Image (spheres, grey):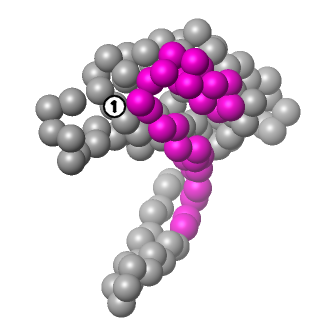
Amino acid sequence: MKYKEFSKISVHNHFGGVGADYSFNDSPSKKRTFDMVSAEAKIDSADGLDFELLGFTNHNHFWKKEYIQLKQYINSKKYNISLLPGVEFDVKKIFLIIKDSMLFFLFQKMMI
């Protein structure tokens, strides 16, 4: 990495191929698949590009077992990458208030 005081990060990443994401209208019983080979390839690519932090943010589902396996894969390869767990939720309407010291932000997202 060129500058040691900076970290290269990507907080919005979908792992496991297109079959790993759930859409807003999917039934909870809909079968989804997680492609570990493609997920590991994405990790390899991120390491080659000097990323140090990646978000694990598939749509509407958290792949716990696969997340743990990817963390183990990163450790086994001795990559300097932290994997941050998360989920990208599709919602119709949301109000979010974030408090940071004395600052307040209100965010509204509408989907049709």
- Residue 36 position, x and y percent, is 63, 15
Q: Magenta span has 76? A: yes
What is the residue that sits farthest to the top in this orientation?
Answer: 37
Q: Residue at x 52, y 37 (%)?
A: 83
Q: Please tell me which residue lies in front, 1 or 56.
A: 1
Q: Residue at x 21, y 30 (%)?
A: 1
On the question of residue 26 being in view, the answer is no
Q: Tell me the crowding category of disc 1: few under 14, some 14 to 19, or many 20 or more residues within 10 angstroms, Cα based.
A: some
What is the residue that sits farthest to the left in this orientation?
Answer: 2
**Amino acid type of the residue that numbered disc 1 sits on in the rendered structure:** Phe
Q: Residue at x 32, y 17 (%)?
A: 48
Rendering quarter of residue 15:
top right
Q: Is residue 48 above or below residue 110?
A: above
Q: Magenta span has 58? A: no
Q: Please tell me which residue lies in front, 68 or 103.
A: 68
Q: Residue at x 44, y 70 (%)?
A: 108
Kindly identify which residue carries mark 1: 51
Quick one: SS at disc 1?
Answer: strand
Q: Is residue 104 above or below residue 79?
A: below
Q: Is residue 109 above or below residue 67?
A: below
- Residue 21 position, x and y percent, is 61, 30
**What stretch of residues is rendered in magenta?**
67-94
